[in-house]
Every structure is written in structure tokens, then in C-alpha cells.
Image (cartoon, rainbow, N blue to C red):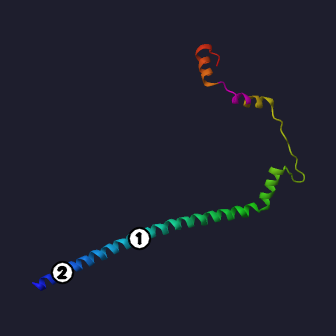
Amino acid sequence: MAEVLKSKLATLGLGLVLIFVSFLTIKIIVQKNRIDSEISSLQKQADKVKNDNAQLSFLLKYFTTKDYQEKEAREKLNLVKDGEQVVILPVTSGDSTEVASTDQKPANYKLWFNYFFNHEN
């Protein structure tokens, strides 16, 4: 009978060890998956930063070109090349009154009142 207890006790002990090892294995697998997802997320961020750096490098090269500097000087400083003539067109008064009238529409309730009672609009 002592041998039976020893074998049952050994089986129980081995079962407990197996459960403990399984628990540790599952814990390690979960931790590995979490680390892998974090690595993936960081890799995506690194790729985005690389793309942003490439775009900024392109813009930096473009902003230092003579064409861009000439364009900005023309637009912001009103500079012209030798031999060029600048034509400035006057603003007509009809355009300015049309813009002003669209900004000052009557209130919505007045429009409805006029629609039903005055028939002016």
C-alpha cells in the first residue's frame, strides 16, 4: 500500500508540476504576443517618421531652390523681373455691392413673413 500512495503521490506531484509549467508557458506566450504587438506598433510609427522626414527633406530642398524664392519674392514682395510690366485691374463697384448685399441677408423669420404676406421676395 505504501507503494500505491507513493505512486499516487508521485502522480499528483507530477500533475502539479505540469500545471505550474503550463501556467508559466501560457504567461510567457501572452507576454510574447504583447511584446510583438508593441514592436509592430513601434515599427509603424518608425515608418511614419521616415516618411515624414523624407517629405520634409523634399520640401527643404524645394524651398531652397531659386524658382521657389523667385516665386515668393514676386507674391509677397511684389517684385518683378527686368522687362516685365505689372497690370493692376480696378475693382468694379458692382462686384463690391454684390458681396455686401449677400453678407446682410434679412433674418429667416422676415423672409418667411414676406413670403406669405408681402410676396416681395
Q: Residues within 10 Å of mark 1 (few under 14, many from 20)?
A: few
In the rendered image, residue 116, in percent from the top left (x then y), is placed at 58, 16
- The amino acid type found where label 1 is placed reads Gln
Can you say whether 68 is above or below 34 in the image? above
Q: Give me the residue at 67% from left, 26% from top.
A: 105
Looking at the image, the residue that sits furthest to the right is: 83
Q: Quadrant of the N terminus?
A: bottom left
Q: Give me the residue at 90% from left, 53% from top.
A: 82
Can you say whether 77 is above or below 62 in the image? above
For mark 2, give the secondary structure: helix
Q: Quadrant of the C terminus?
A: top right
User: In which quadrant of the rendered view does residue 52 lie?
Assistant: bottom right
Can you say whether 86 is above or below 95 in the image? below
Q: Are marks 2 and 1 in contact (CB under 8 Å)?
A: no
Whether 36 is among the magenta residues is no
In the rendered image, residue 11, in percent from the top left (x then y), is placed at 19, 80
Q: Is residue 28 left or right of residue 54?
A: left
- The residue tagged 2 is 9
Task: Pick the residue in front: 58 or 106.
Answer: 106
Q: Is residue 71 left or right of residue 116?
A: right
Q: Residues within 10 Å of mark 2 (few under 14, many from 20)?
A: few
In the rendered image, residue 75, in percent from the top left (x then y), is placed at 80, 50
Q: CA distance from mark 2 to mark 1?
A: 33 Å
Looking at the image, the residue that sits furthest to the top is: 117
- The residue tagged 1 is 31
Range shown magenta: 100-106
Task: Pick the residue in front: 7 or 81.
Answer: 7
For mark 1, give the secondary structure: helix
In the rendered image, residue 28, in percent from the top left (x then y), is placed at 38, 73
- The amino acid type found where label 2 is placed reads Leu
